[in-house]
Image (spheres, rainbow, N blue to C red):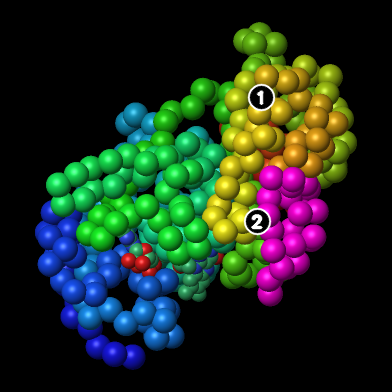
Amino acid sequence: MRGFEYYKPKTVKEAIELMVSLENAKFIAGGTDIMVLIRQKKISPQSVVSLRNIPELAEIDTKDGLRIGSCVTHNDIDKNEYIKKYYSALTDATSQLGSRQIRNVATIGGNICNAAPSADTACPLLVLDAKAVIIGQDSSREVDLDEFFLGPGKTVLSRGEILKEFIMPRFNENTGSSYIKHTRREAMDLPILGVATRITISITSGNEVRCRDMFCTIDSISNILERLKDEGLRCEDVRIAMGVVAPRPIRAKKAEAALKGKIVTPELFEEIGEIAASEAQPRDSVRGEAWYRREMIKVLVKRSLAKSMDRVIRPDEAIYPERLW
Ligand SMILES: Cc1cc2nc3c(=O)[nH]c(=O)nc-3n(C[C@H](O)[C@H](O)[C@H](O)COP(=O)(O)OP(=O)(O)OC[C@H]3O[C@@H](n4cnc5c(N)ncnc54)[C@H](O)[C@@H]3O)c2cc1C
C-alpha cells in the first residue's frame, strides 16, 4: 500500500479548503470503505482528509424532525431511542450493518457517499424523505436523496463538496416505517435485496383498531392481512424503496401511487408487491440471481408494509416478533 498524507481539519470550511488545494485527495470518515479500496490498490490518493474531528458533523438533532450529521456512526443511530421509535426503518438498517466493530466507526455519510447499490441505510433514508445537505467552497445546497445517487459509486458531489448532514421531516403520528435486509446468512453479510417502506394510515380517534394484538402472534403475514381487512384502514401516504435491484437504490413510485388513498387489503398488498417488482431491474450476481430477487421483492414489500403498519397499530411495543418478518 502506497503512503499518503493524512490531514485532520477541525471545521467544515478548513476541510473544503484542503480538498480544493490538494492534488488527488479523498475525504475519509470511518474509513471502512475507502481503506479497503486503498489496500486493494483500486484507488491511491496522495492525501486523505479526515472528517472525524469536526464536531458539527457528528451531531444528532431531534428538535424539528430529524437531523443526522454525516459522521454519525451506525452505532450512535442504533442507540438513539427517538430514532428507533419515529424513524424505525433507519434503526432496522443500522442494527444489522456489518459487525459491531464496523458499526462503531463506520458512518451514515460514508455509507451514502460510497453509493453502493447495496448500502443498507439508503432505502430507509429514501422512504424517510431525507434530503442531503451539501456544502461547497462558496455554496450550500439541499438535494433529495432520490437525486443524490447517479450510479454505482457515483453521486452528485463535486470535488471539494462535503455531505454535511441529512434532514428528515417529522411524520404524522399514524406513521410507521421498516427495513428488511434479505441476506444469505444471519451473520455479517451484504444484502441480496433490501426493501424499506413507510406508511401513514388513517385511524380516526375513538375508533381504535380492534385487532391490535394480531401482530403478537406468529401467524403468517397473509393471515394477519386477511384479518386486518375488516378494520377498513386507509393508506394516507406511502413510500417504498428497494436496494440491489438497479444500479442505484430506487423508489417504487408506481407501487406507491397504486397504494396511496386505498383501503388496505391482502389482495392490494399482493398487487403492490407485483408492481414494485416490475419497477426493478435486478441482475445476476454472486449473491443472487435476477429472477430470485424479483420474486423476493414481491414477498418483502408485502412484509415490510405489514411491519410498518404493526408499528402504527402497536407503537409502544418494544419487542416485535422478528420471526414473522
Ligand atoms: C467487514 C465489512 C462489513 C460491511 N458490512 C456492510 C453492510 O452490512 N452493509 C453496508 O451497507 N455496508 C457495509 N460495509 C461497508 C461500510 O462499512 C459502510 O458503507 C460504511 O457506512 C462506510 O462508512 P465510512 O465512514 O467507513 O466511510 P469511508 O470509508 O470513510 O468513506 C466512504 C466514501 O465516502 C466518502 N465520504 C465519507 N464521508 C463523506 C462526507 N461527509 N462528504 C463527502 N464524502 C464523504 C469518502 O471519500 C469515501 O469515498 C462493510 C464494510 C466492511 C469492511
Residue 257: image quadrant is: top right
Q: Label 2, on which residue?
A: 245
Residue linked to disc 1? 260
Is residue 59 among what the camera can see?
no
Label 2: how many Cα within 10 Å (few below 14, some 14–19, many 20+): many
How far across and down, in percent of the image, does residue 101 sit? 44, 71
Q: Residue at x 43, y 60 (%)?
A: 154
Q: Is residue 83 above or below residue 114?
A: above
Give the magenta part as a residue range: 277-303
Q: Amino acid at mark 2?
A: Val
> Disc 1, ligand 1: is the CB inside 8 Å?
no
Q: Which quadrant of the frame does ligand 1 lie within?
A: bottom left
Residue 59 percent across, percent down from the top left: 28, 47
Q: Secondary structure at mark 2?
A: loop
Residue type at mark 1?
A: Lys
Q: Earlier in the sequence, mark 2 or mark 1?
A: 2
Q: CA distance from mark 2 to mark 1?
A: 23 Å
| Badge number at residue 299 | none
Q: Is residue 29 left or right of residue 195?
A: left
Residue sitting at 64 percent across and 17 percent down?
202
Q: For residue 146: magenta?
A: no
- Residue 198 placed where, x, y %? 59, 35
